[in-house]
Amino acid sequence: MSQSATDPIVDQDVIVDVAGGVGRIVLNRPKAINALTVDMLTTIHRTLEAWRDDREVRSVEFSGAGERGFCSGADVRALRSVLLDEGLNAARHFFDVEYPCDALIATYPKPISSIMNGITMGGGMGLTLHTPRRIGTPTTQLAMPEVTIGLFPDVGATFELSRMPLETGTWMAMTGAPVDAASALWAGLLDDARDLEDTPEGSWLATASSWIAECFTGDDPSAILQRLENHENEDARACAELVRTKCPLSVAVALELVRRAALLPDVPAVLEVDRVLAENFMRDSDFAEGVRAQLVDKDRQPRWRHQSVEEVTRDEVLAAFEPAGPSAGR
């Protein structure tokens, strides 16, 4: 017997059902903070495609199981294992599934709301940041932390980051630091939030935006770091110390990506740039080492190929944005 749109679909890691005209997609890996796998993304994409023209589904809602968060991002430990064990083409498959799903969400013809509870980072931002209604809670923590593991802020997120006020999106991309719900409301990353004590105008990010705007201008990551290190505000100097702990190549590429995303017309266009970067980073970057240090051995002592941002050349940054030839994969 065929399944109707209102019949619940229970995949071990994704729960899908329709009630009262609302299609609900619940990420269901709470022990892993709902970290995304290829199978989960495939289920989400196929579900949204099925609901696109279904009259029983008038709107869609994303949420995550568990108290810790909506989604911690991609399961990068699994992605690292695939890269090391099976090679570039196998690792590239993850992005070939993830980015079209993000693009579909960004262009979806029906209203989508996202409950961005707790940790909502990386790939979780790809599922939620591009939706028309983004709802925070008192525990919301939004971030694109990829520079910590030798990647770059992907999933089309730099479209929104590049349009945040006063260079705060540049700060997010280069530091990987999280923002709370009040800060996210102030910056335009949320549309609504529940039961907040702080006001957007009094949030940490709103208060810090003055020194962020002064320091995170221009296209030179070394100059940004110099301004931070020489700033009178101790938070700015602490920010410089934080950036110094991140992957130097990732920091430099993140800045360039934010600048390019600001000139692109929509999320799908940014995702096309992300696709090129993802392939190049899987082929030749600090990703495997970053994940090892952060999530596998957990020694928090990554051995980056560059000792500092100053060592990263402009040619290396530009090369990361260049499509590889047809024989480059394996």
Image: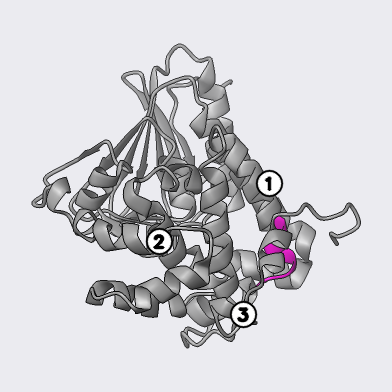
Image quadrant where one finds the N terminus: top right
User: What residue appears at the point 63 percent right and 69 percent down from the top-left corner?
Assistant: 80
Name the residue carrying label 1. Answer: 96
Left-right relation of 244 to 282? left
Cα gap from disc 3 to disc 1, whole angstroms: 31 Å
Name the residue carrying label 2. Answer: 216
Q: Which image quadrant is residue 329 in?
A: bottom right
Crowd class of label 3 (few under 14; some 14 to 19; many from 20; radius 10 Å): few
Depth check, mark 3 against mark 1: the one in front is 3
Residue 74 x, y percent position in the rendering: 52, 57
- Front-most of 285 and 88? 285
- The residue furthest top is 55
Callout 1: SS: helix
Cβ atoms at labels 2 and 3 below 8 Å apart: no
- Front-most of 203 and 218? 218
Residue 38 x, y percent position in the rendering: 61, 50
Mark 2 or mark 3, earlier in chain: 2
Cβ atoms at labels 3 and 1 below 8 Å apart: no
Q: Which residues are magenta?
A: 279-285
* Label drawn at residue 139: none
